[in-house]
Image (cartoon, rainbow, N blue to C red):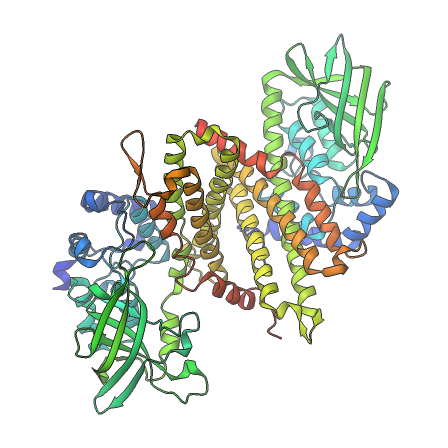
């Protein structure tokens, strides 16, 4: 069955997969999804702690930030394994994104401490930077006061602090704000994947420490977006592959007209097409995980687009092949669909990513 | 004779892929005649490409995978991929290759020493041009139901029946024939024999069948009491089915090689530039999808190529490339006709402002075929359902 077939000469990747399988056996992804959803929470503290203890939160951080200094292949495998197990904590947006953003900035002591806390799961640091439609939010820093509203924020209710991307004059600045800062208001809405997303409004909030500014910050942000998209792509590839397996099992056991429904050619051809979607998502992720440095940006755009299309298509078809059972909340397959939709919509849907790929290629 | 024909042999597999690529490309680029590059015709007949065929044979580079003792290059799968990639990149024409790709490998693996010594040099010299006699009017996807019969009569077999979709039979003089030698076999697969048949034998009639592109690259071949020496049986009598299925090996990867859709997308890009289509947001969106599908096909192809480079063998799952590649080729050529607008009513090539042309209709029609041949895409899905997904039959 489809898997991202990375070389694993020293068995690091196998170790990561085993470690996550052990964690998933404890955490029970679908049950956690439902529990978190019922609680109206933005993450499950127990699972988040388990991810920290297993080293997954520190995985993208360099060693001097308490990280494991692992590369794209390791991140890819970790995220794929999360997807397969339906561990639906906001790993990409709340561990990979702020982690790689901090790691890509010119380092200082404070920054190292922040990142190390993130890796240990003690600090939860959502980045405030998007408006309601995912564009750059109009957050402004004027006379050391922050004003504006950020949307689509994962982990806002659990946050210990925020990384605020604001504009001062024409220049971007990144500010670390404690969650307790006065004038800060969080409004949460339920997300489709059982975790809330919030709008965070700032009204004349006294700015905390400026972590970075200018071109260095823009470069770091671009790098963080690319790495996070890779994690999202791999997680989507894992979701698609696992949803396919579940559907193959279901149709091979469901009997109608005296035969298993998987014995019907119409069903077989649909399953083969779903398998092909999953295979292509995996090979696109493999390509993005191993592309030479200069080709990573394009390879990641392609992988996120492919894996997003693939996971959403596979899970939609999986619902159909589960029949009425697939339309129940009780059946796990629906959770795979909802998670796939959420990750596909995060940091660019396939259409937008493909157009970005094309623009970059035609400009070259 | 063979030693003279191959002055350039060495252990190609000892080179890096990049070294081999450079050597091969350099010679091919200097040697393949310009008027044969990027031919409009997909399946030129032997005479049209004879000079290129003979140049390859003189160099000893006509048969990439045959062992060197039989005049081949002895390339492993990794080097063979380089060979095929460079061939496509430089726009070299397809040569009538059933002798090199089908009969040769079959004889090398299953033929007698006498058969090898007689037939292999004649393939390299171009004296024998082969075609593949498998499909019949009532045995296409269900090939094992074939009925063309071979009946033993002393030292000979007597052939009666009809083959169809026999590509380039009209310019071939030998046919690799699958014939029924046992009508009573418990399973139809167990009564089939492979025979080497001289098409100039009395009783053989070849007729061309014009295809959608209004060209004659496939044929029907009729056999009326055609007598074939029994020594022309390959392998055992009634054991031909396994032989016919054995020869493809790693070459199944080439059914999914990105070169055709890559070429077609380049033509679409040229036409779209010329007609200003990139200014249209809807077109840009559709084009981006096709471009990324091609890019991702490259990533998928690379995953399977890597298995071969590392000395592995391919499983049934490699045909995912064939499905995706052939269907992508179709979609690209459909989009090209859409960009052609009212001009999609023309059969001939569409002129560009810079004096060039785009063969929009030619490619659209050509793209219908690959999803059918080499095992139709529907048959591929049946096989994948069983072999890869393990789906039940009841």
* Residue furthest top as drawn: A143
**Which residue is at a point 45% across and 42% down the rendered structure image?**
B335
From the top left corner, tell me how far across and down residue A346 is, in percent: 67, 36
Say whether residue A72 is left or right of residue B223: right
Residue shown at 56% from the left, 65% from the top: B385
Q: Is residue A132 left or right of residue A285?
A: right
Residue B79, horizontal then vertical, whole percent: 33, 53
Depth check: give the residue in front, B341 or B215: B341
Q: Is residue B302 visible?
A: yes
Quarter of the image for the N terminus of chain B: give it: bottom left
The vertical placement of B275 against A276, above or below, is: above
Give residue A75's position: percent from left, percent from top: 62, 42
Image vertical order of residue A97 relative to residue A36, above or below = above
Residue at the extreme bottom:
B154
Residue at the spot 66% in from the left edge and 18% down from the top edge:
A212
Q: Quadrant of residue B74?
A: bottom left
């Amino acid at each position: 069955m489809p898997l991202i077939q990375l070389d694993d000469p020293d068995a690091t990747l196998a170790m990561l997969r085993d470690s996550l399988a052990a964690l998933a056996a404890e955490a029970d992804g679908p049950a956690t999804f439902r529990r978190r959803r019922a609680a109206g929470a933005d993450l499950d503290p127990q699972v988040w702690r388990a991810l920290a203890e297993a080293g997954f939160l520190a995985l993208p951080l360099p060693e001097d930030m308490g990280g494991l200094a692992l590369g794209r292949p390791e991140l890819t495998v970790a995220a794929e394994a999360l997807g397969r197990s339906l561990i639906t904590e906001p790993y990409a947006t709340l561990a990979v994104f702020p982690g790689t953003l901090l790691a890509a900035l010119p380092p200082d002591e404070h920054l190292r401490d922040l990142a190390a806390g993130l890796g240990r799961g003690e600090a939860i640091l959502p980045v405030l930077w998007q408006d309601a439609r995912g564009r750059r939010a109009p957050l402004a820093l004027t006379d050391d006061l922050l004003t504006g509203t950020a949307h689509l924020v994962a982990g806002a209710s659990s946050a210990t602090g925020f990384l605020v991307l604001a504009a001062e004059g024409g220049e971007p600045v990144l500010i670390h704000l404690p969650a307790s800062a006065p004038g800060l208001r969080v409004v949460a809405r339920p997300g489709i994947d059982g975790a809330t997303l919030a709008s965070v409004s700032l009204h004349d909030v006294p700015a905390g420490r400026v972590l970075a500014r200018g071109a260095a910050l823009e470069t770091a942000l671009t790098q963080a977006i690319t790495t996070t998209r890779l994690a999202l792509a791999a997680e989507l590839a894992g979701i698609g592959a696992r949803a396919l397996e579940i559907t193959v099992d279901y149709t091979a056991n469901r009997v109608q007209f005296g035969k298993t429904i998987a014995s019907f050619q119409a069903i077989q051809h649909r399953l083969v097409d779903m398998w092909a979607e999953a295979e292509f998502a995996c090979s696109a992720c493999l390509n993005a995980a191993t592309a030479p440095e200069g080709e990573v940006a394009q390879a990641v755009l392609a992988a996120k687009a492919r894996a997003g299309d693939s996971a959403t298509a596979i899970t939609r078809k999986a619902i159909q092949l589960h029949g009425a059972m697939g339309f129940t909340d009780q059946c796990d397959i629906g959770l795979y669909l909802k998670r796939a939709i959420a990750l596909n919509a995060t940091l660019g849907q396939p259409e937008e990513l493909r157009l970005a790929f094309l623009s970059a290629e035609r400009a070259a | 004779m063979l030693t003279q024909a191959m002055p350039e042999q060495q252990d190609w597999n000892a080179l890096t892929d990049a070294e081999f690529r450079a050597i091969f490309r350099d010679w091919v680029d200097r040697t393949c005649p310009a008027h044969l590059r990027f031919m409009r015709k997909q399946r030129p007949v032997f005479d049209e490409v004879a000079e290129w065929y003979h140049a390859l044979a003189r160099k000893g580079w006509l048969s990439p995978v045959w062992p060197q003792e039989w005049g081949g290059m002895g390339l492993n799968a990794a080097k063979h991929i380089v060979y095929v990639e460079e061939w496509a990149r430089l726009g070299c024409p397809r040569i009538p290759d059933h002798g090199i790709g089908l009969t040769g490998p079959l004889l090398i693996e299953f033929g007698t020493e006498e058969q090898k010594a007689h037939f292999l040099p004649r393939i390299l010299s171009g004296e024998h041009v082969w075609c593949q006699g498998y499909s019949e009017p009532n045995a296409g996807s269900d090939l094992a139901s074939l009925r063309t019969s071979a009946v033993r009569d002393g030292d000979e077999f007597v052939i009666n029946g009809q083959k169809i979709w026999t590509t380039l039979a009209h310019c071939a003089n030998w046919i690799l024939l699958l014939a029924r030698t046992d009508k009573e076999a418990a399973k139809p697969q167990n009564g089939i024999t492979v025979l080497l048949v001289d098409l100039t034998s009395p009783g053989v009639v070849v007729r061309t069948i014009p295809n959608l592109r209004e060209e004659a690259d496939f044929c029907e071949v009729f056999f009326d009491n055609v007598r074939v020496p029994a020594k022309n049986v390959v392998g055992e009598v009634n054991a031909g089915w396994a032989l016919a299925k054995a020869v493809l090996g790693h070459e199944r990867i080439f059914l999914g090689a990105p070169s055709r859709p890559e070429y077609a997308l380049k033509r679409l890009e040229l036409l779209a530039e010329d007609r200003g289509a990139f200014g249209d947001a809807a077109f840009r969106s559709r084009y981006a999808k096709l471009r990324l599908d091609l890019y991702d096909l490259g990533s998928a192809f690379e995953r399977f190529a890597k298995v071969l480079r590392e000395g592995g063998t391919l499983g049934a799952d490699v045909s995912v490339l064939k499905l995706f590649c052939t269907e992508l080729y179709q979609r690209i050529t459909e989009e090209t006709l859409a960009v052609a607008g009212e001009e999609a009513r023309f059969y001939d090539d569409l002129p560009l402002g810079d004096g060039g042309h785009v063969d929009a209709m030619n490619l659209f029609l050509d793209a219908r075929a690959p999803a059918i041949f080499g095992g139709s895409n529907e048959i591929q899905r049946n096989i994948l359902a069983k072999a890869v997904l393990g789906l039940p039959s009841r």
